[in-house]
Structures are given as structure tokens and as C-alpha cells.
Amino acid sequence: VFTPATVAAAPEDPLFGLMKAYREDPSDKKVDLGIGAYRDNNAKPWILPVVKKADDAIHNDPSLNHEYLSIGGLADFTSAAQKLIVGADSPAISEKRICSLQTISGTGAVHLGGLFLSKFHPAQPTPTIYLSNPTWANHHQIFTNVGLTLANYPYFSTKTKGLDFDGMLGALRAAPLGSIVLLHACAHNPTGVDPSQEQWKQIAELMRERHQFPFFDTAYQGFASGDLTRDAWAIRYFVEQGFELCVAQSFAKNFGLYGERTGAFHFVSAPGADASTASQHIASQLAILQRSEISNPPAYGARIASRVLNDPVLFAEWEEDLRTMSGRIQEMRRGVRERLEKRGTPGTWDHITTQIGMFSFTGLSETQVKILRDKWHVYMTKNGRISMAGLNTHNLDYFVEAIDSVVR
Ligand code: PLP
């Protein structure tokens, strides 16, 4: 029987706990910098104009119905998602050595990839997956649940508030041959710190030497820099270098399709005579796993994304929307840094503008984070991560005043 003794109460998800505390705070000054979802300059969720357009077209399309999609999802969507991430002219596509399935957003893609690797990775019974320290908290839960062994590589330097590149390379060099390495393709969550292209090249070189398997998680393509190609650079470089790898791709942030759970999982086989056969086998096994977990993925978000991705006019409008979101975030970064530097707030603040994407690791301590919440009604995760999208021209001065007061 299931009793309180056999089923202990699980701790509340820290992020969702933070959201609840924010909602219940009656202060009219409160600032939400917790959840990683885009907000406009009035702190409201933003429906991308191009998504609204695609959505309207779907509502008026008499050819659509509510039938199941296939196990692998909407084919027009997965093929466009594939081109978006590896590039339309990638040899992985022309050589038929990439297979793609539609998933329950990025989370589902990470899970499907983890499950596949736990079953088929040659280092049985338990291959080790190396995660950056820190990483998106859900990585730990997902990979533990599918039975992979977890290990960490250093990532963030508290001294420079940038990449601990030596620490990262040292850990990968020491990792067993053939380990899986989870890499954030761009706009690392939670730090906002990415390797430079030069550093990515060195990471690739070392991983090749160590026969390691790159598992890319990409949740911010186009959202980070405003440029879809630039944000896919690392993945395309690894594919070019002939790696066998996989990619978990989310369209939550770059389409603003958070609740529609729109994503894809891609597996790229290394070039070689049997690569396309291997790819077919892999696709068939992924389909079996998918069938047992979700049967077939949800249609709605994939239809929206597919319309945009496959129509050159809508695609160009989407790129404009991406520039709107990333541009506003970059403006907020500059705004925070300028104001702190102007005030002479103790510390260095250049990391606010060198970090990229939705999040910034401020370097604030847990005590400072608590004072910000209790006294200033400013909500962020206790590791000092802020979601830049929660800042806007109305609360920027107040936020900077609060930061200034807690670090003095
Ligand atoms: N991976 C990373 C690094 C993320 O930051 C996120 C979202 O915050 C995801 C994956 C997956 O998000 P979703 O399942 O909403 O697509």
C-alpha cells in the first residue's frame, strides 16, 4: 500500500515555488525575474505576430482535422526543424544520416535522447553523461530517470563570471573514453555564458580525441543573438567535423510556443558507408520508444511552426520577431550595466552584457537574493540567476536601485 511512509512528500519545484510566492506578493513594485519566458516591455507574455498569423490560417484551413499525427510527428515540421538546425545544405541531410522525431518540446527531446542512449549506448550497462556545472536543473532529473550515470564538468568561473574553460577541458580530458557530454548549443541556462567559436573548436578537438558523444540541447536558437545561423554555429561545426551526435531542439522560446510543447529530437550518424542504414535503424528504435511514451506528438504547435518554417515570407517575419525579442533583451542588459556603472555600484558589471540570451548569472549571493525578495519584492532563483525578459523600461531603475542597495 502507498502510505506517507512509503511515499515521502517530494520537495516543491524551486522555480514553480518562486512563481507562486511572486503571485501572492501584493506589492505593486514586485519584479518577476524567475521564470524563463519572454515578456514584453509591459511585463506581459508576447504572442509573436507571425505566430498569430499562422494560427489564424490554421483556424481557417478546412483541410485540417483532429486525427493523430504519425509516431514521428508532422513530417513537414520535422524536416524543416532539421534544416533549421543543421543547415539546409548539410551533408547529414543529403547523405540521409540524420533522423528526426517530433517531441514534447525540448524537455521531451532531452528525455527521448536520454532514453535512447541509456538503452543503446555501447558502454552498457550505464554510460556516463557529463553535465555542465551548473546546468538546467531538469537535466539532472531527466537523465537520472532514464538510468544514465551523471557526472559534472566545471563551467562557470565565479571569479570572471565567464567560462571556466580550463576547468571544462580538464574534466573532459579526464572523462572516460566514449562518455556522453551534454552541451548547451547557445545561451547557456542558467549562466548566459557560451564558449567562443575558437573555444568550441578546442572542445570538439578534445572530444574527438576522447571519442566522446556530443548531446546538444538547443532551446534558444535565434532568441539569443537574433540570428538563427549564428546560434546554430556550434552544432553545425560539430556536424561538419564528422561527429556522431544528437540534438534536443525546443521551439518554446523562439516561437513563444511554451504551452504547445513543440520540439524535435535529431540523431546525426557519422559519415560512412553504413551511415544511412544506421540512421534508419536508429529512427526505427526511436519510434518504438516514442510509441511507448506518448504514442504520437501533439499537432497544434507543430502546425504553427511548420507553416512559418516552410513559407519564405512568414519565415522572414519570424526572423524579425526574433530580432524584436533578442534586441529588447540586449537593450535591458545594456541598461542594467550602464546604470550600475554610473552609480559606482561595487563590483564589475561587464558580464551583464557579455552574457547572452534569456538569463544572466549576476553573481549575487543567496543572502543578497533573499534580501532582494523580502525587502525589494524582486524575485530571482537563489543562485542569483535573473531572467532578463522580466526587466523593462518601467522597472529597470527600481531593479538597479535594489541591486545597488544589497551589494553595498
Ligand atoms: N533545455 C534548456 C537548456 C532549457 O533552458 C529549456 C527551457 O527552459 C529546455 C531545455 C526545455 O524547455 P521546453 O520543454 O519548454 O521546450
Image (cartoon, helix red, strand yellow):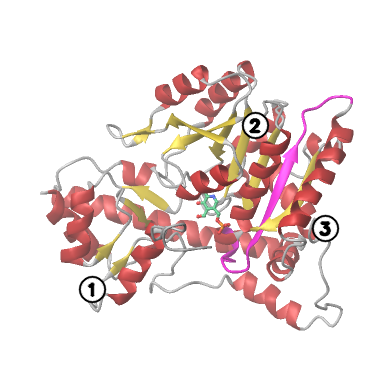
As drawn, the label of residue 248 is none
| Residue at image mark 2 | 237
- Point out the residue furthest to the front here: 1
The quarter of the displayed image where residue 315 is located: bottom right
> What is the x, y in percent for residue 235?
63, 37
Graded by Cα atoms within 10 Å as few (under 14), some (14 to 19) or many (20 or more), the crowding at tag 1 reads few
As drawn, the label of residue 75 is 3
Residue type at tag 1: Lys
Q: How far apart are labels 1 and 3 at the CA level?
A: 47 Å
Camera-near label (2 vs 1) is 1
Relative vertical location of residue 17 with respect to residue 158 in this rendering, above or below:
below
Relative vertical location of residue 4 with respect to residue 107 in this rendering, above or below:
below
Which mark sits nearer the N-terminus, 1 or 3? Answer: 1
Residue located 45% across and 19% down the image: 170
Which mark sits nearer the N-terminus, 2 or 1? Answer: 1
Residue located 29% across and 35% down the image: 158
| Residue at image mark 1 | 29
Residue type at tag 2: Tyr
Relative vertical location of residue 347 with respect to residue 249 in this rendering, above or below:
above
What number of labels is visible? 3
Residue type at tag 3: Ala
- Give whichever of 229, 238 is nearer the camera: 238
Q: Is mark 2 within 8 Å of ligand 1?
A: no
Q: Which residues are magenta?
A: 254-273
Camera-near label (2 vs 3) is 3
Instruction: Judge from the rendering whether residue 286 lies leftward or rightward of residue 195; answer left or right.
Output: right
